[in-house]
Image (cartoon, rainbow, N blue to C red):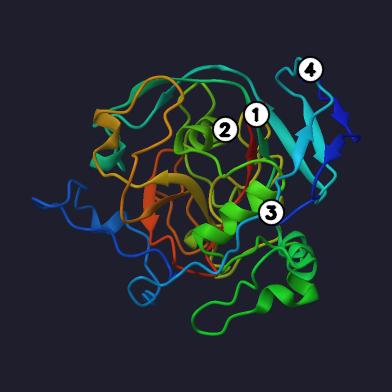
Amino acid sequence: MLRRTLLTVAMMGLLIACGPAPIPEPSDSPTSLLATLTDTQPSPTPSQLPPPNTPTTVSPSPTLARVTIPITEPILGDTWLRPSDGMQMVFIPAGRFQMGSMESEPCAHLDELPRHTVHLDGYWIDHTEVTNAQYRNCVEAGFCTLPICDYGDSTYMEGTMENHPVGCVNWYEASAYCERIGGQLPTEAQWEKAARGTDVREYPWGEGFGNQLCNSSESAINDSTPVGQYSPAGDSPYGVADMSGNVWEWVVDWYDIGYYATSPSMNPSGPQAGENRAVRGGSWYANHCSVRTTYRYYNSPYGRSPGIGFRCVLNP
């Protein structure tokens, strides 16, 4: 696959600006359609929800970076180095893919049903999760909020962790970082297509779990690993790394357990409102069922956890 890595860009405006652990899934009940598969659920860490009506600590950006990517007609395999923070981005071409799971799949949950066809316009997505070092630079520039967990975890400032994915950022802080580099958090559909491609992969690398291909609970590392550690063997068909395990990733969508039944087929962006935001991809404490490309999870947008990070997208 031809890759054309371009290291130049014309930018205007600012260069960059930038919960608790995921809350336990509800059981199968009149108020919840998730299948009760207790042996396939990730083990949640203790919940530390903020007080009701906790205000966001993110200030509005005075201006957003206007990004001009010097590829007028990108194709599959194109990459681009974002100069604002050094992140490599990968191009995902426009087209259709199958989103969600079949009921017959062993690990499938009801919020992954039905499998349905989605068409997405082309977009760029970060090759890995945003790292501690990248986010720290944003904090030191005065644009981002220090990501300290409710129980005082601020290990992201340690030099030994600088190439690990940043954690303890809530949804608002993650969203603000992406906005200030001229993009946004990915939609659930954008995230899933980048993870599984068009051949309905169960995992980014294909069918069948392999604990040597991602950082999950089966790896018994019990912490994050540097981004890209499992690349390229664990990459998606587009060459996107760390889509399974390591840390959960915020996406832009509100979480709705039954959204797939009514989701539009063109560029779905999620429900208009909700209580929780969706997270995707699993983490180091999630098991093999929860790091599948179709697995959906959620958390309060104010929630913070060392096990939740993010990556960004740019929509041409």
Amino acid at dot 1: Tyr
Residue 103 to residue 277: above or below:
above
Going by the picture, which residue comes out furthest to the front? 62
Residue visible at 24% across and 39% down in the picture: 258
Mark 3 vs mark 2, CA separation in Å:
31 Å
Residue 138 to residue 49: above or below:
above
Mark 1 vs mark 2, CA separation in Å:
7 Å
Mark 1 vs mark 4, CA separation in Å:
19 Å
Select label 3 or label 2 by which is in front. Answer: 3
Q: Position of residue 197 (x, y in %)?
A: 54, 26
- Residue 104 visible to an observer of this rendering: no
Instruction: Looking at the image, tell me whether mark 1 or mark 4 is earlier in sequence order.
Output: 4
Query: Residue 124: which quarter of the image?
Result: top right
Residue 191 to residue 250: above or below:
above
Asked if the residue at tag 2 contacts the one at tag 3, i.e. Cβ–Cβ closer than 8 Å, the answer is no
Q: Residue under circle 3?
A: 62
Residue visible at 58% across and 81% down in the picture: 153
**SS for tag 3?**
loop
Residue visible at 71% across and 48% down in the picture: 63
Amino acid at dot 4: Thr
Q: Residue under circle 4?
A: 72
Left or right, 181 with respect to 176, comes to: right
Q: Position of residue 138 (x, y in %)?
A: 75, 62
**Relative to the observer, which residue lies in front, 153 or 182?**
182
Q: Residue under circle 2?
A: 194
Query: Residue 18: which quarter of the image?
Result: bottom right
Task: Count numbered badges in the picture.
Answer: 4
**SS for tag 4?**
loop
Q: Quadrant of the N terminus?
A: top right
Asked if the residue at tag 2 contacts the one at tag 1, i.e. Cβ–Cβ closer than 8 Å, the answer is yes
Q: Position of residue 156 (x, y in %)?
A: 69, 73
